[in-house]
Amino acid sequence: MSGNGKNFGGGRRDPDPRSVGLVGVLLGGPSAEREISLKSGRAVSRALRESGYRVVEIGEAEGVAEGIAAHNPAVAFVALHGRFGEDGQVQRLLEEKDIPYTGSGVEASRRAMNKVESRRLFEAAGLPVPRARVCGPGPPPRKSPFPYPVVVKPAREGSSIGLSLVGGPGEFQEAVDRAREHDSEILIEEYIPGRELTAGVLDDRPLPLVEIRPSSPFFDFEAKYVPGRSDFRVPARLPDRSSRRIQQLGLAAHRVLGCFSFSRADIILGPGGRPYLLEVNTIPGFTATSLLPQAAAAAGVDFAALCRRLLGAALTRGNYQSKTEQKII
């Protein structure tokens, strides 16, 4: 079975709260994932305050851009999910103001958020992905290009928003219309039955895998956020060789997109034990029970330590993506 991956200790110093200055935790925001972002941001704020940092929450009672201008934080902890927070927009705003921030830079964030662009990069790098058809803003397709069931989803949304598992032709048009409500560009993807896994990366190294066991046929919005709708195994119960292979797939996806510091890849272990890469999240959930924090805890990094570590990476890197983002491999 896979080991617990407790190899993330080792001499790293947390940033000194006395020298950091004001930490702006960006939360809420304008996206469809606002409520989830509020939970993430509040959990991060609490952990950083308990660690001695001065924290201001930005984005709940005010616009994020207005709050940044008003508070002028020394460093930003980005806990914004979805559009504006996860697609490079807020990262560009922070760079223009010379404010260091957690997580990936402008271009890596944009690439990861766009499922069409990211899967093209994955394919070019030889990473295994399900078959898919991209449909642009023209006339919508009348039928599925693949045998049912299929997955229909918008190109630029997270948390399974606008996503449908389509069991037959009678459900197809409704699923297309639902996805089109969120984006003019959509993906129709073959459904891969199998085990739901997530491969986290921290400090550009793979974390222990998390296996997700949803009560529904796949890991949809309710399975992600309604208590009791999913069970989790950390580390996933897999042979060591399979675990290492999937961890390396998550790390490869992180590098292909040029991500920095941390990310979380969603992967299906399909028939015959073949893994399929679905997408990469550059700002996954940040509560103690979210998937990346669970994986970090299995590696010996508790939630407060994780928040401090990400803050330290932001301060060490600075905020200039042209100097710090990894090149696409």
Image (cartoon, grey):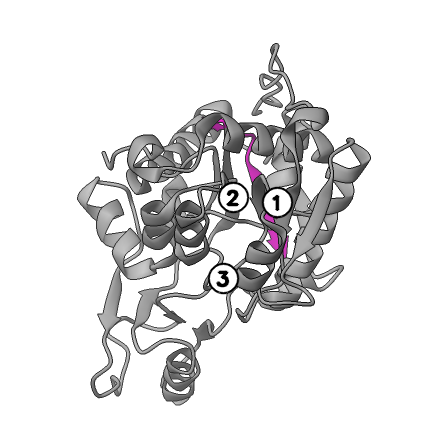
**For residue 191, side relative to residue 59 (left or right):** left
Between the C-alphas of marks 1 and 3, the distance is 17 Å
Identify the magenta region. 203-216
Q: In front here: 141 or 193?
A: 141
Q: In front here: 317 or 12?
A: 317
Q: Residue at x 28, y 78 (%)?
A: 144
> Relative to 201, is 194 above or below?
below
Between the C-alphas of marks 3 and 2, the distance is 18 Å
The answer to whether the residues at label 3 and label 2 have Cβ atoms under 8 Å apart is: no
In the image, what residue type sits under mark 2?
Thr
Residue extending furthest top? 11
In the image, what residue type sits under mark 1?
Leu
In the image, what residue type sits under mark 3?
Gly
Q: In front here: 41 or 73?
A: 73
Residue 133 at x, y percent in the picture: 24, 68
Question: For residue 204, which quarter of the picture?
Answer: top left
Q: Which of marks 3 and 2 is nearer the N terminus?
A: 3
Quadrant where the C terminus is found in the figure: top left
Label 3 secondary element: loop
The answer to whether the residues at label 1 and label 2 have Cβ atoms under 8 Å apart is: yes
Say the numbered circle drawn on residue 291. Answer: 1
To which residue does mark 2 refer? Answer: 198
Q: Which of marks 1 and 3 is nearer the N terminus?
A: 3
Residue 87 at x, y percent in the picture: 40, 57
Between the C-alphas of marks 1 and 2, the distance is 8 Å
Q: Is residue 43 magenta?
A: no
* Of labels 1 and 2, the one closer to you: 1
Residue 267 at x, y percent in the picture: 44, 47
To which residue does mark 3 refer? Answer: 82
Q: Which residue is drawn at 66% across and 29% down?
A: 298
Q: Residue at x 59, y 44 (%)?
A: 77
Say the numbered circle drawn on residue 168. Answer: none
